[in-house]
Image (cartoon, helix red, strand yellow):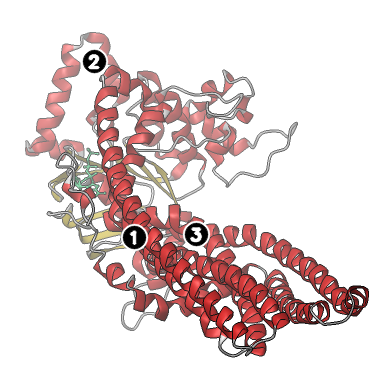
Amino acid sequence: MGPPPDPGLPEVILSWHARDRELTETSLGTIARRFPATILQAARLAWRASRADTITTVSLNVAAGFFTAFWLLATTGVLTALFSAAPTPSRVRDALPSLALVAGAVTLRAGLQAGAGWAQARLEPQVERLVELRLYEATTAVDMTALDDSDFLDELKRAQGRGMASAPMVVQQAVDVLTGAIGMIAAAGTLGVLHPLLLPLLLLTAVPEGWASLRSARMRYLMMLSLIGVTRRKWILSELMVDRVHAAEVRSFTMRRFLLNQYDRSASYQRRVELDVARRQLVVKVTGDMLKGVATALVYVALGIMLWRGSVPLAVAGTAVLAIRSGQSSLANLVFAVNRCYEEGLYFGDYVRFCDAAEKRIPHRALAPAPAGEERRRLPDDFAHIRVRDVAFTYPGADAPSLSGVSLDLRKGEVVALVGENGSGKTTLAKIMAGLYDPDAGEVRWDDVPLTTVPPQDVWERIAVIAQDYTHWPMTARQNITMGRGRDHADGDAEDPAMLAAARASGAEEVVAELSHGYGTLLDRRFKGGADLSGGQWQRLAVARGFFRDAPLLICDEPTAALDARAEHQLFERIRTHADGRTVLLITHRLASVRHADRIYVLERGKVIEEGDHAALMARGGLYADLYSLQAAAYGAGGPRAQAGQTSAG
Ligand SMILES: Nc1ncnc2c1ncn2[C@@H]1O[C@H](COP(=O)(O)OP(=O)(O)OP(=O)(O)O)[C@@H](O)[C@H]1O
């Protein structure tokens, strides 16, 4: 189906992402079977969003349908009076009571429909809020491995984009289905009362339009599935082209042409697929319209024959024409709404499936049982000893393990360093110790409590992390340090002394002193009045954030990569003096700064290959000694000032 793939696009983005299931789910038979479930889903969603508005919408629509039937039947009274043999003035006089009924019914119906429309409009934002919250509650809590899984990310993209937008539409279309069905029942009921043969004729006109719209919807949905990889790639490329963070590299690496070409390739492939679908949809629509024309002609011919043979009187035939027209328009609305509801239901199904899957990947729902004979215990607020034993971990989809058989010990008040070359597994180990990933084998215990037996939040509450890749939070300098843990700050309030102490210790104080609104300065240039910081200034804030958090374990992963020599020296001094009694896990390539660590673990290819203090590792003459000597030689080559710096930093 569709145009041939562009050979220039990576295979992975052209794949159908194993969507055979959806393909079979979009046959016309399954549409009919699954449609009630879609309606039920919409009803449940609306009910949870607002019971009052749901009840109002449904009941007002039902009442409006009742008045539609009433109006049509009252019209027969008007026509019967008008077509009678009496003189014109008395014919009009006779028609007046029925006419008053028609006018009353039409006015009431309009009022009820307006009320239903208003309740429906109120439902929409409430449904939106409900589905947004559900998705974000799941994405902020899922196991970190989920976010390393490309299938999960694809499903997230679908759920967050089209899936989430479809939620209010599903509800709206379900209400439209109800409205159309009621209008249709009113017209059909009227026709049934007038003459039983007219009803099947009306339904006949619905078949071609229904067929055409459902086919079109199916084509559109399949197209969306086939393009998901391409649209995700386009989205990533467009972020690269518009985001300020990448602007300098896009220019200095002359990436502009390359990015534009890549984007254009994806966009033109998407355009070809879309045009192809539009062409096939047009053929379907024209065929459907032609068949509908033929069916309508048949209905009128049948009505003409019935009139000619005297099986229906003229007034009834007149009402029948009105009822057919009203029924047809309700039917057209109904078919349109069924089709849209089904289509939106497919996208909404993506959203629901994603949320269900994501919620299953929220770790606290699946805590490992406490070891046999032990009760589930609380994680100690502080610990005497953290033990890592035989930990192994492989990232989802990775060919090789990132950690295998790693063991280490961290006693209260110690500074323990992890060193090793790039990719040796230091950050992965730190993340496992921080409770961000569960090990595939082995365990991490705080005293006697394995981390996998307690909710991860308990671990996160008790650690402070100065991460390698930290976030530039688009918030004030104060919030960047306190991250929701500080007390609320009003203008004129004195700053939190703990925050000031953390800022002083990290060197963030000097950074903030330069800002126009001090700690209240918004650190995002995308907003009016926002400021931006240099890389090192941001890192000082990240360090302040780690110091501010009152946690017994401080994990520092490359905390000084962007710091100037003075700030780096200050930070390592602080870590060396245990950062106010905390236990510190330090990851760094600056080996001079780990000389005073209580213990150093050297990692290579996910294994601990050496351990001991600086003197022991130097005496051993292994990888650590090699790396240290290399750095020392480089400092030595820098002259006496550099050497002096190194000595004082170590
Ligand atoms: N999210 C991920 N998905 C798959 N593999 C990963 C992921 N993160 C890291 N890896 C792989 O795990 C291995 C260890 O990475 P890790 O980041 O722990 O190394 P590191 O020692 O901290 O390196 P560096 O010194 O460069 O920071 C590497 O081979 C890396 O490619």
Label 2 sits on what residue type? Answer: Gln
Q: Is residue 158 visible?
A: yes
CB under 8 Å between callouts 3 and 1?
Answer: no
CB under 8 Å between callouts 2 and 1?
Answer: no
Quarter of the rendering occupied by the C terminus: top left
- Front residue of 566/515: it is 515
- Front residue of 361/151: it is 151
- Taking the spot 90% from the left edge, 75% from the top edge, the residue there is 96
Closer to the chain start, of discs 3 and 1, is 3
Camera-nearest label, 3 or 1: 1
Q: Which residue is mark 3?
A: 166
Closer to the chain start, of discs 3 and 2, is 3
Q: Quadrant of ligand 1?
A: top left
Determine whether, in the image, residue 500 is placed left or right of residue 338.
Answer: right
Q: Which residue is mark 1?
A: 219
Q: Which residue is mark 2?
A: 643
